Image: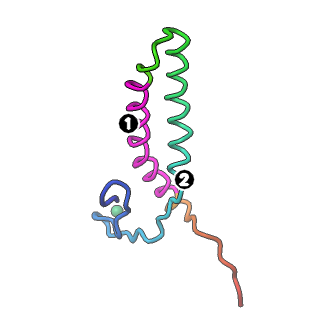
Amino acid sequence: MFKGFLDVAPRCEVCGLDYSFADAGDGPAVFVTLIAGFLVLGAALLVDVEYEPPLWVYVVFFLPLTLLVCLGLLRPLKGVLIASQYKNKAAPGRLDVK
Ligand SMILES: [Zn+2]
């Protein structure tokens, strides 16, 4: 469903479903921020309490870990949100003016 890293393709390659409805907005970024923050910050706090390593350990280890977790989660979460948008027929609100 993606062309490139995060761009949504115009239609499904398999069944031809039109992806014009797909707009996950900032949803994936919100979930990625919350999940990655919990995982990485929790791990950093645990490491700090258990081992009290020097500052460079955080820069060398947790900075790349943050990038990996964030980039690794972004695409699957966008796919999940678009799939749930499709399943629940979610769309922007419209006024029913007659
Ligand atoms: Zn399809």
Q: Which residue matches tag 1?
A: 68
Residues in magenta? 59-84
Give the dominant element type of the magenta stretch: helix, strand or loop.
Answer: helix
Q: Does the magenta stretch include residue 22?
A: no
Residue 45 in percent (x, y) is at 55, 20
The quadrant of the rendering that contains the N terminus is: bottom left
Please give left or right for residue 56 compared with residue 89 in the image: left
The quadrant of the rendering that contains the C terminus is: bottom right
Q: What residue occupies the far bottom of the structure in this picture? A: 98
Q: Which amino acid does label 2 sit on?
A: Gly
Residue 25 in percent (x, y) is at 52, 60
The answer to the question of whether label 1 and label 2 lie on touching residues, with beta carbons closer than 8 A, is: no
Please give left or right for residue 63 compared with residue 93 in the image: left
- Placement of 96 over or under 34, stated as above or below: below
Q: Which residue matches tag 2?
A: 27
Q: Name which residue lies at 40% across and 30% down.
A: 65
Helix, strand or loop status at disc 2: helix
Q: How far apart are marks 1 and 2 (CA)?
A: 19 Å
Please give left or right for residue 20 compared with residue 2 in the image: right
Q: How crowded is mark 2: few (under 14 residues within 10 Å), some or many (20 or more)?
A: some
Q: What residue occupies the far left of the structure in this picture? A: 13
